[in-house]
């Protein structure tokens, strides 16, 4: 089933062959897989964000019985515009997931209405230490969120995804890092997602 996810991305987005050459090292535990695609992807061409997306999938990504089902981490490495305001983050994530769902379903579930997908975001206080010469506008912004959508790959049923999102800016680049899982945040998969995120952030600040 994970191959189905990769094939869907291949058919709807430009895959970057030189996966990590232009990205900070994006490590993940053994057994996790990954892809890199160009943004905006073919399944969501109306997205305003431009750059690349690096993704790491948990081993149970496409196994509904797994405790890591549909759990993954990704980073958007972006051009400096548009600014990553609360509204832009919410709008762009909804475009991404709505487009992904409808492209994968490809008319097989005509009752699914992507306009009814919702994303609730709560902005949190940043836990990051300020960087030298960092402007307030460049400081990390943290969100927790809940996405209500239809999971189109394995179940084709409504799903509630928990998200933790961090956005920040550096020189001429913007970044969005997201940890995603339907599992509760106190479960083991989140420790793995946080470890992936923290390792990436450490590489970015070295």
Image: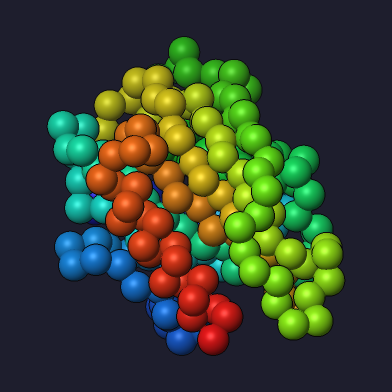
**Which residue corresponds to the image point at 64% horizontal and 69% vertical from the top-left?**
129
Question: Of residues 114 and 77, which is closer to you in this image?
Answer: 77
Q: In the picture, which quadrant includes the N terminus?
A: top left
Residue 81 point in image, percent of width and height: 80, 64
Q: Quadrant of residue 105?
A: top left
Q: Residue at x 30, y 67 (%)?
A: 28
- The answer to whether 8 appears left or right of 67 in the picture is right
| Quarter the C terminus occupies | bottom right
Is residue 201 visible from the viewing direction of this image?
Answer: yes
The answer to which image quadrant residue 121 occupies is top right
Q: What residue is drawn where x is 63% and y is 50%? A: 142
The correct choice, above or below, for 165 with respect to 17 in the image is: above
Q: Is residue 108 left or right of residue 62?
A: right
Taking 115 as reference, is 29 above or below it? below
The mark total stands at 0
Q: Position of residue 61 (x, y in %)?
A: 26, 46
Q: Is residue 112 left or right of residue 86?
A: left
């Amino acid at each position: 089933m994970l191959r189905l996810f990769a094939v869907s991305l291949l058919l709807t987005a430009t895959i970057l062959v030189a996966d990590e050459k232009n990205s900070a090292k994006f490590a993940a535990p053994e057994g996790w897989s990954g892809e890199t695609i160009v943004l905006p992807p073919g399944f969501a061409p109306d997205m305003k964000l431009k750059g690349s997306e690096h993704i790491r999938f948990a081993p149970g990504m496409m196994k509904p019985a797994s405790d890591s089902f549909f759990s993954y981490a990704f980073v958007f490495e972006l051009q400096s515009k548009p600014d990553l305001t609360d509204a832009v983050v919410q709008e762009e994530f909804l475009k991404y997931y709505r487009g992904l769902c409808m492209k994968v379903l490809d008319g097989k579930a005509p009752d699914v209405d992507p306009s009814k997908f919702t994303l609730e975001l709560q902005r949190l206080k940043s836990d990051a230490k300020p960087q030298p010469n960092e402007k307030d506008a460049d400081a990390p912004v943290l969100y927790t969120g809940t996405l209500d959508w239809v999971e189109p790959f394995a179940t084709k049923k409504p799903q509630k995804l928990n998200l933790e999102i961090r956005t920040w800016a550096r020189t001429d680049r913007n970044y969005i890092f997201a940890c995603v899982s339907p599992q509760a945040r106190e479960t083991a998969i989140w420790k793995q997602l946080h470890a992936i995120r923290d390792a990436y952030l450490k590489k970015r600040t070295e």
